[in-house]
Image (cartoon, helix red, strand yellow):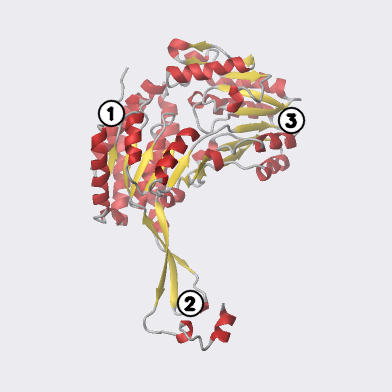
Amino acid sequence: MLSVVNTPVERIPDIVAQQRRYFATYKTLSLEYRLDMLRRLRKAIVEHEHELVVALYRDLHKSYEEAYLTEISIVLGEIDNFLKNLPRWAAPSKKKTPLKLFPSKSAVITEPLGVALIIAPWNYPVQLLLNPLVGAIAAGCTAVLKPSPYVPNVSKALAELIKECFDESYVAVVEGNREVNAALLKERYDVIFFTGSPALGRVVMRSAAENLTPVILELGGKSPVIVDKRANIELAAKRIAWGKTLNAGQTCIAPDYLLIHRDVKEYFVDKFAEAVRELHGEDVALSKHYVRMVSDAAFQRVSGYLADGDIRFGGRVEAMERFIEPTLLDNVSVESAVMREEIFGPVLPMIDIESIDQAIEFVNSREKPLALYVFAEERDAERVISHTSSGGACVNDVIMHIANEYLPFGGVGNSGMGRYHGRDSLYAFSHRRSVLKTSSRIDLPFRYMPYRWFRWIKSLL
């Protein structure tokens, strides 16, 4: 099995220094330069599509279709969105100026923060490395990229793509394990973009605090899905089965646990089983679209959750293949590991509820999730949305909010801070700078001591 070769840690300070010098040349500020770099990245992704999807299959058993839909197409869509809109998004934004500041004009300009560090996870390793890079390039930053070592084939493919596409002083890839991560985080950046677990997010934030570096943290947590008794149960089961088996549940916004009305639970279990068979066939292990656990450690952790409840559907595991069948768990204690830890796998514990209000109370008793899903009639769904907090949400659907490039994506509280996608990606890597321009032809005396016209000035304030 391929393993990642660590970038020598002694090279890291030089890479960051090169990028700081390159940023100081002001080349990245030109709008045409940024658009040209985005076009170059898009061309490279298209040309390297085969290498990327082969690497995704080798590391995660992702089919071509799933790799394209959940990784490559999302990055290409983000680039296309920027190519179409960046001139308008990056233009100065005129603001009103109050009469008291006459004869001034006001505007907000968008300027790049500088050198960015982007650290990506293993579950969507192409999308979650390159999508933030699109924002960094669009803003006019340079970028140091760190792929996950848990997907060595993808890491290698991305490193080759970036090396062919960009000079290291502009965009560089640093590969390796936690030792390399630690060395990276010792350097000073102008912004850090991290996607991963809340535990590692705290490590990143502590390092960033040493230099007061701003951070965008895209974390995770336990994203609930609520199914009320008046929901379309058949549709809910199908969409939840799709969302939970996509990438074998190794998705930061996958449905993590199910709050289901006790009156419809049995019907839901039957329909969930039907939906899984419809999606993946009678034997899920034979489905070309069913991903495997990323590592033996991940397999052991997720398969261990099967002991935390009664298996109502699924439960088959094959250690040699790192295969875990989509599984519904019943009679689960809210204090068990499967209800305390982010699952990140195809196991879905069920908790009975008797009302929407009970579901709301349960969600609010826990950390704010990255996503929240509710299947209910419109009035009840609106009550859930208005009385809870989450990074994002879907009504009568799961996961699909991330597919809309016009919606910002990000967490809240324990599930992260900052947001990106579309215009928000530009702002994530930018400083929104307020500028007041005052004419030198007129110099009104009202501001100056000894404030002879103070009574009149006071009326304007």
Q: Position of residue 132 (x, y in %)?
A: 40, 42
Residue situated furthest bottom in the rendering = 452
**The quarter of the displayed image where residue 456 is located:** bottom right
Q: Position of residue 49 (x, y in %)?
A: 33, 31
- Amino acid type shown at disc 3: Lys
Name the residue beneath numbered marker 1: 6
SS at circle 2: helix
Query: Who is closer to the viewer here, 245 or 253?
Result: 253
Residue 229 is labelled as: 3
Does any portion of residue 287 appear in the rendered image? Answer: no
Query: Who is closer to the viewer here, 427 or 461?
Result: 461
- Amino acid type shown at disc 1: Asn
The mark lying in front, picked from 3 and 2, is 2
Earlier-in-chain disc, 3 versus 2: 2
Q: Indicate the quadrant containing the C terminus: top left, top right, bottom left or bottom right.
A: bottom right
- Amino acid type shown at disc 2: Leu
The mark lying in front, picked from 2 and 1, is 1
| 296 left or right, relative to 117 | right
Residue 101 is labelled as: 2
Dot 3: within a 10 Å radius of its alpha carbon, few (fewer than 14), some, or many (20 or more) residues?
many
